[in-house]
């Protein structure tokens, strides 16, 4: 029996639990916890209707290490899958250590009071997990996650040496709203408005947020403007594939989204420091999150596709310089039909299920803290094809011309 506890009942948690319930040979006993237990109940009802599988639900404040530890001990899972907010990563890791259970997440820790993204806080847990004989898997989403596995798969099968790596994330979907984010608004806006960074020649190069734009023609989506950003897989890839001279991350944004974001920034609504209003301290970005559409509610109206992948250039195993592009295209309407969630949640929730499955089956194992690119990419790549995120690879004439 492989019992699993999932913490977090947003869109990603919903997709992951639905996909786990579609694989009862691996996930024989599924438990779901969140601060808002009504969200867990709604997911459980959908899972029951779509798959016939019953899951258990719980109310949990994942910031409370003692309460989380107690729930883990009560349930006795083989693995805790953290799909809560990145602020809660360390608390949940502490609870897993206290309860003696393996850990997995999809996004790195960040403090609540600063838009600062790095793995140092979680890498610092290496000795504690290793000494406990437990495994912590970091970043089993799409980016980070699939994009990191794409890189390690390319290195394993096609390249003697990768020189440059560009990660391209395009969401070509239209949800019909004037302004909405496709995942947690607070996390999304903190990420987008942070300074851009990329890795080049052994050091970080920092540029202002959204200051560097290029156009790229994405298959089945079309030409889109994409912007240089920082994303946490750049840090782990630079560490674990140190041969790469330049690693960049690009994400597409529409003009309307950027215009709304500019206005919100100008009037102070993206601030993360407290503001006193009627004698009460509120954080503007958290208030903005409360009035924006819930990302999980966008599924019924979102149409279009995502296209996310890696472009790698380097010395091929045939001794020749080459450029390869490996990518996935996901349809928002197909994702909604299968799980009741749009493709941005789907492309993160499916890899979360796959990473959990590989850990539960012992195909990925070890003691300590691991980023996903440190592990064998082949079983993960196989499961992507089997569980809704098929990928393809093609050779390009050369690297990106910019």
Image (cartoon, rainbow, N blue to C red):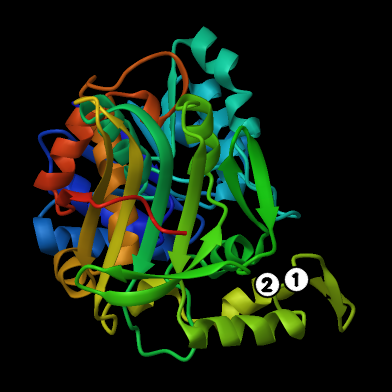
Q: Residue 213, how many percent across, how many down?
A: 53, 70
Q: Are marks 2 and 1 in contact (CB under 8 Å)?
A: yes
Disc 2, SS: helix
Can you tell which quarter of the image residue 284 is in? bottom right
Can you tell which quarter of the image residue 106 is in? top left
Residue 8 appearing in the image: yes
- Left or right of 381? Residue 242 is right
Q: Residue at x 76, y 85 (%)?
A: 267
Which residue is under mark 2? Answer: 285
- Judged from this view, the residue extending furthest toward the front is 320
Q: Earlier in the sequence, mark 2 or mark 1?
A: 1
Question: How many other residues sit within 10 Å of disc 1, few (<14), some (14-19) or many (≥20)?
Answer: some
Camera-side residue: 170 or 21?
Answer: 170
- Left or right of 356? Residue 243 is right
- Left or right of 3? Residue 88 is right
Which disc is residue 271 wearing? 1
Instruction: Tell me: residue 251, above or below residue 398.
Output: below
Question: How many other residues sit within 10 Å of disc 2, few (<14), some (14-19) or many (≥20)?
Answer: many
- Left or right of 81? Residue 303 is left
Cα–Cα gap, marks 2 and 1: 6 Å
Camera-side residue: 39 or 141?
Answer: 141
Q: Residue 16, how many percent across, how many down?
A: 28, 50
Residue 341 appearing in the image: no
Camera-side residue: 48 or 269?
Answer: 269
Q: Residue at x 35, y 41 (%)?
A: 313
Q: How many marks?
A: 2
Classify the position of the N terminus by image quarter.
top left
Q: Residue 273, how many percent across, how many down?
A: 81, 65
Q: Residue 174, how many percent across, how many down?
A: 33, 83
Disc 1, SS: loop
Q: Residue at x 32, y 18 (%)?
A: 365
């Amino acid at each position: 029996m492989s019992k699993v506890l999932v913490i977090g009942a947003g869109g990603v948690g919903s997709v992951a639990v639905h996909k786990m319930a579609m694989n009862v040979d691996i996930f024989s006993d599924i438990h779901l916890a969140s601060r808002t237990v009504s969200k867990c109940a709604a997911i459980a009802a959908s899972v029951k209707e779509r798959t016939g599988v019953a899951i258990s639900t719980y109310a949990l404040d994942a910031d409370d290490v003692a309460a989380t530890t107690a729930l883990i001990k009560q349930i006795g899972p083989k693995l805790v899958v953290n799909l809560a907010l990145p602020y809660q990563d360390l608390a949940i890791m502490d609870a897993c250590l206290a309860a003696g259970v393996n850990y997995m997440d999809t996004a790195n820790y960040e403090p609540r009071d600063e838009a600062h993204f790095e793995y140092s806080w979680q890498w610092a847990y290496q000795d504690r997990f290793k000494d406990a004989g437990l495994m912590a898997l970091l970043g089993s989403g799409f980016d980070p996650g699939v994009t990191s596995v794409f890189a390690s798969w390319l290195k394993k099968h096609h390249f003697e040496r990768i020189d440059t790596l560009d990660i391209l994330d395009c969401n070509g979907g239209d949800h019909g709203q004037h302004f909405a984010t496709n995942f947690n608004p607070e996390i999304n806006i903190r990420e987008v408005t942070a300074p851009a960074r990329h890795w080049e020649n052994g050091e970080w190069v920092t540029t202002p947020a959204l200051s560097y734009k290029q156009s790229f023609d994405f298959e089945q989506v079309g030409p889109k403007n994409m912007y240089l950003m920082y994303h946490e897989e750049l840090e782990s890839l630079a560490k674990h594939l140190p041969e790469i001279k330049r690693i960049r991350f690009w994400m597409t944004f529409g003009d309307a989204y950027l215009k709304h974001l500019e206005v919100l920034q100008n009037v102070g609504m993206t601030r993360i420091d407290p503001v006193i209003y009627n004698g009460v301290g509120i954080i503007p970005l958290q208030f903005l999150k409360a009035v924006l559409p819930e990302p999980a509610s966008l599924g019924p109206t979102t149409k279009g596709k995502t296209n996310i992948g890696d472009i790698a250039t380097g010395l091929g195993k045939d001794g020749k310089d080459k450029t390869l592009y490996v990518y996935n295209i996901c349809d928002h309407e197909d994702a909604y039909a299968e799980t009741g969630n749009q493709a941005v949640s789907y492309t993160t929730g499916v890899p979360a299920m796959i990473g959990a499955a590989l850990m539960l089956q012992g195909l990925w194992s070890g003691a300590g803290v691991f980023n996903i690119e440190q592990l064998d990419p082949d079983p993960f790549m196989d499961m992507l094809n089997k569980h809704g995120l098929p990928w393809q690879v093609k050779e390009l004439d050369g690297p990106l011309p910019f």
